[in-house]
Image (cartoon, rainbow, N blue to C red):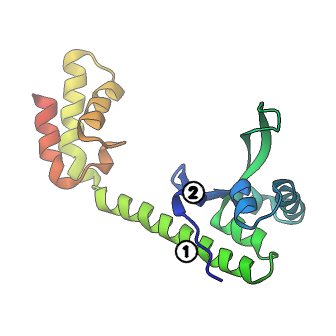
Amino acid sequence: MNAIINVQDFVQVKNSQTITTSEFIAQAFNKRHDNVLQSIDNLLADIDPAFAAQNFRETEISTQNNLGFTVKNRAYELTKDGFMLLVMGFTGKAALAIKIAYIQAFNKMAEMLSGFHLQAQTTPDERKPLRDAVFALAAQYGLAYSTAYKMVHQRFNVESIDMLPAEQIPAAVAYVHH
């Protein structure tokens, strides 16, 4: 049996970490969500609290009940390690195929995430001219540093200047001085 797991649906990036949810696990393994929650609760009672805190995060999901009303239900976000620990107990050919597909999905998402960070990283020395220009701009116009940096982030579509490729630093410095 060959299980197909859509990375975008079942494995997500949250706070720079690849995760899945108890709801997605229930769907993929064709189990009731409350049964998956019970399995997680049983695991959490028996494992080291530090491991639990790193790999299982309780959250809420919104679903519609039979009457069409939106209700909030308890759920968990699981890292790859949390997922692996939970589903080790699931058995059968279908479960095995889904476990493999999930592992591949986690690995693909982690690869995409790490490739993005490696591609755009710059060193503090490479960023120094831009930092100096931003500080000068902030001082000249009485701007908060965060406001001056935000202009660069928006113009070059990056979350922070350390994500700016080295070859774009001179253009960013010119932009700040313009």
Q: Picture coordinates of residue 5 (x, y %)?
A: 58, 68
Q: Picture coordinates of residue 27 (x, y %)?
A: 72, 60
Q: Which residue is mark 1?
A: 104
Q: Which one is in front in this view, the residue at disc 2 or the one at disc 1?
A: 2
Farthest residue to the top: give it. 142
Q: Residue at x 36, y 59 (%)?
A: 116
Q: Secondary structure at mark 1?
A: helix
Where 34 falls versus 118 (above or below)?
A: above
**Amino acid type of disc 1?**
Gln
Label 2 neighbour load within 10 Å: few <14, some 14-19, many 20+: few
Res. 49 image quadrant: bottom right
Q: Residue at x 25, y 23 (%)?
A: 138
Q: Residue at x 76, y 48 (%)?
A: 75
Which quarter of the figure is the N terminus placed in? Answer: bottom right
**Amino acid type of disc 2?**
Asp
Where 53 falls versus 72 (above or below)?
A: below
Q: Disc 2 or 1, which lies upstream in sequence? A: 2
The answer to whether residue 3 is left or right of residue 37 is left
Q: Picture coordinates of residue 132 (x, y %)?
A: 20, 36
Measure how far apart labels 2 and 1 are at the Cα level: 14 Å
Farthest residue to the front: give it. 67
Q: Which residue is mark 2?
A: 9
Q: Picture coordinates of residue 12 (x, y %)?
A: 55, 55
Q: Secondary structure at mark 2?
A: helix
Residue contact at pointers 2 and 1, CB within 8 angstroms: no
Residue sitting nearer the eye, 167 or 87: 87
